[in-house]
């Protein structure tokens, strides 16, 4: 199974996606997701210029050796661009191995540990009535767990609030924070206003929807450790499934302080890219859920290593699954999540219809649970003609400024 062709396919059906397709001498092809939101073309160049030439002629069966070769031979290690590129190669090789074996990837990873993956969706609203409508809509779509984000009085635009108003009709940018255009959009932020407001939102949601429904919340890296501690403590009465990205957490030690003050479960890691980013927070049991996506953490091979390490401390998976993870990256997450013992929950935002036409998927959605399906490999096909209809469009994630003009974590 020798790699004969390696193509990097860029398409922008509802948003930008970067996909690696490997084709072998026995006519099989494998797909890998390399999408890095707002920095897509950096990964394209890394793959096209530096990785593709190294792949041609290699034995596609040698997944571990290829991973180690790409990681170690570059000399320059880690980082989102490098690790997304390695992830794409790794996913494509697992896809190929599954097709060669005639088995879905989860079988190669040890087989199913469960019948389906509990998933959560993104409910949001500028105010409580809008939020309640959104939660009801999610429940009607079958979700059995929801993330809750709302507007904050006094702030104009805020992370996580669905809005179609400013975007092209029909394009799935309602949940998507990146916006097409030549410059990033500016949002405003006020931590004190946010900390005052959020507990009242959860109180209202519990009052309306009862104690059972698992509720999640994303603070999106905006708080200092003591502010995060305050938020975790103030949300304890509402029994959150998790509080996500309470602090930026490049400083892993900072989470000790948060942990000392609150029993609200903590999830972190969607912007981490290796096991080294988790070393201290897993060993010291400072988190409860690992948020990494297969796409941004060196593929199935490396994220499995992170999750096996986490399992020793009863820390579970909560893989990132926003719309900027392509259907290929989502499929990889579902196969891995089905196989590991320490699965926690899967984030799941539906892609738009154009994206679903480019990427034909085989996953199923039933009673709030996802299953990757039983087609050999990852179970996703890419329609090249459909992909060709949507050329790359520049898009940026927004950024924050405080009232006095200071740039703040977004
Ligand atoms: O902001 O995927 O939990 N989900 C998130 C996402 C991220 C985007 C960034 O590309 O925080 O909405
Ligand atoms: Co997040």
Image (cartoon, rainbow, N blue to C red):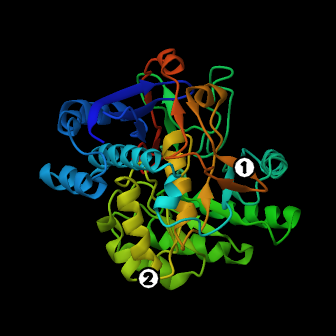
Can you say whether 34 is above or below 237 in the image?
A: above
The percent coordinates of residue 24 (x first, y second) are 32, 35
Can you say whether 110 is above or below 311 in the image?
A: above
Locate the N terminus by quadrant: top left
Graded by Cα atoms within 10 Å as few (under 14), some (14 to 19) or many (20 or more), the crowding at tag 2 reads few
Residue appearing at x 44%, y 82% in the figure: 312
Q: Is residue 404 visible?
A: yes
Q: Which mark is residue 365?
A: 1
Q: Which mark is residue 312?
A: 2
The percent coordinates of residue 282 (x first, y second) are 40, 77
Work out whether residue 99 or residue 216 is closer to the camera in this orientation and state it.
99
The percent coordinates of residue 347 (x first, y second) are 60, 54
Local SS, label 2: loop
The percent coordinates of residue 83 (x first, y second) are 30, 50
Graded by Cα atoms within 10 Å as few (under 14), some (14 to 19) or many (20 or more), the crowding at tag 1 reads some
Answer left or right for 102 relative to 117.
Answer: left
Residue appearing at x 21%, y 42% in the figure: 58
Asked if the residues shown at circle 1 and circle 2 are in contact, with their CB atoms under 8 angstroms apart, the answer is no
Q: Is residue 318 visible?
A: no
Q: Which mark is residue 388?
A: none
Work out whether residue 19 or residue 288 is closer to the camera in this orientation and state it.
19
Answer left or right for 217 relative to 398.
Answer: right
Total numbered labels placed on residues in the image: 2
Cβ of disc 2 within 8 Å of ligand 2? no
The Cα atoms of the two marked residues, 1 and 2, are separated by 30 Å
Can you say whether 140 is above or below 233 in the image?
A: above
Residue appearing at x 20%, y 37% in the figure: 57
Give the mark toward the camera: 1 or 2. Answer: 1
Mark positioned earlier in the residue sequence (1 or 2): 2
Answer left or right for 39 relative to 14.
Answer: left
């Amino acid at each position: 199974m020798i790699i004969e062709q390696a193509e990097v396919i860029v398409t922008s059906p509802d948003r930008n996606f970067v996909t690696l397709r490997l084709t072998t001498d026995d006519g099989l092809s494998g797909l890998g997701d390399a999408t890095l939101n707002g920095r897509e073309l950096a990964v394209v160049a890394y793959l096209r210029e530096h990785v593709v030439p190294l792949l041609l002629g290699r034995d596609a069966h040698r997944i571990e050796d290829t991973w180690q070769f790409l990681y170690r031979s570059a000399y320059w290690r880690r980082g989102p661009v490098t690790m997304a590129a390695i992830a794409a190669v790794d996913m494509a090789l697992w896809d190929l191995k599954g097709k060669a074996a005639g088995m879905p990837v989860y079988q190669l990873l040890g087989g199913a540990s469960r019948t389906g993956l509990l998933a959560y969706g993104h409910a949001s609203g500028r105010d409580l009535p809008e939020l309640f409508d959104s939660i009801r809509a999610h429940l009607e779509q079958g979700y059995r767990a929801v993330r809750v984000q709302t507007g904050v009085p006094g702030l104009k635009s805020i992370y996580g609030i669905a809005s179609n108003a400013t975007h092209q009709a029909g394009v799935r940018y309602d949940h998507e924070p990146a916006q097409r255009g030549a410059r990033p959009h500016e949002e405003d932020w006020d931590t004190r206003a946010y900390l005052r407001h959020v507990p009242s939102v959860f109180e209202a949601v519990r009052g309306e929807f009862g104690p059972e429904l698992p509720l999640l919340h994303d603070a999106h890296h905006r708080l200092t450790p003591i502010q995060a501690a305050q938020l975790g403590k103030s949300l304890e009465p509402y029994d959150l499934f998790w509080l996500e990205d309470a602090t930026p957490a490049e400083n892993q030690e900072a989470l000790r302080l948060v942990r000392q003050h609150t029993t609200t479960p903590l999830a972190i890691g969607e912007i981490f890219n290796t096991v080294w980013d988790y070393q201290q927070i897993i060993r010291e049991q400072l988190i409860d859920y690992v948020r990494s996506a297969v796409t941004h953490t060196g593929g199935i091979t490396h994220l499995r290593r992170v999750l096996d390490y986490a399992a020793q401390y009863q820390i579970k998976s909560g893989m990132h699954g926003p719309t900027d993870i392509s259907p290929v990256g989502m499929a990889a997450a579902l196969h891995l999540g089905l196989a590991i013992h320490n699965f926690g929950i899967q984030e799941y935002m539906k892609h738009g219809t154009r994206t679903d036409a480019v990427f034909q998927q085989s996953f199923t959605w039933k009673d709030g649970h996802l299953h990757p399906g039983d087609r050999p490999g990852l179970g996703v096909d890419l329609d090249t003609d459909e992909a060709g209809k949507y050329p790359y469009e520049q898009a940026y994630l927004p950024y924050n400024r405080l009232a006095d003009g200071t740039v703040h974590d977004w």
